[in-house]
């Protein structure tokens, strides 16, 4: 299985998938920390987190998969949403919560 197939499988295996540096319990960069806090403040308790620091192939492959040069990257139901700034903007407008509710990630 090539890296793009692995990523496709990952982003579709859970309703909410966050590619980040570190883990939700111990983020390794401010942007990843912000992304985790944004999801938690929306009420998301369960999401898949992929630590790109432990797999160089995933770290590079995810940038190519979405044609997005930075990490973190959020996927909801397999669809690329954006990074921490986009997540924050969507949260402020209520759009992120609506999308998360639609996929059953929050009540």
Image (cartoon, rainbow, N blue to C red):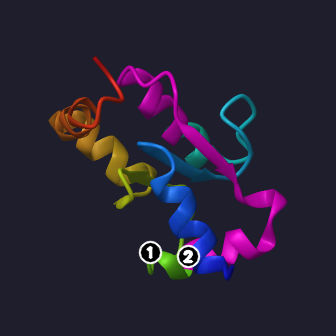
- Residue 98 x, y percent position in the rendering: 18, 34
- Residue 28 x, y percent position in the rendering: 74, 45
The residue sitting at 33% across, 53% down in the picture is 86
- Residue 41 x, y percent position in the rendering: 40, 22
Q: Are marks 1 and 2 in contact (CB under 8 Å)?
A: yes
> Residue 105, relative to residue 1: is it above or below?
above
* Residue on which the image places disc 2: 63
- Residue 27 x, y percent position in the rendering: 70, 39
Residue range highlighted in magenta: 35-63
Q: Image check: 106 left or right of 21? A: left
Q: Image check: 22 left or right of 100? A: right
- Dot 2: element: helix
Q: Image check: 106 left or right of 63? A: left
Q: Image check: 47 left or right of 50? A: left
* Residue on which the image places disc 1: 66
- Dot 1: element: loop
The residue sitting at 28% across, 17% down in the picture is 107
- Res. 6 mark: none
């Amino acid at each position: 299985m090539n890296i793009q197939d692995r990523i496709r499988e990952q982003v579709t295996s859970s309703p909410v998938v966050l590619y980040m540096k570190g883990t939700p319990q111990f983020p390794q960069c401010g942007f990843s920390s912000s992304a985790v806090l944004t999801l938690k403040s929306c009420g998301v308790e369960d999401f898949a987190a992929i630590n790109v620091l432990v797999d160089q192939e995933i770290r590079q492959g995810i940038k190519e998969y979405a044609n997005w040069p930075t990490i973190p990257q959020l996927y909801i139901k397999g669809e690329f949403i954006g990074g921490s700034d986009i997540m924050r903007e969507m949260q402020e407008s209520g759009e992120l919560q609506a999308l998360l509710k639609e996929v059953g990630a929050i009540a």
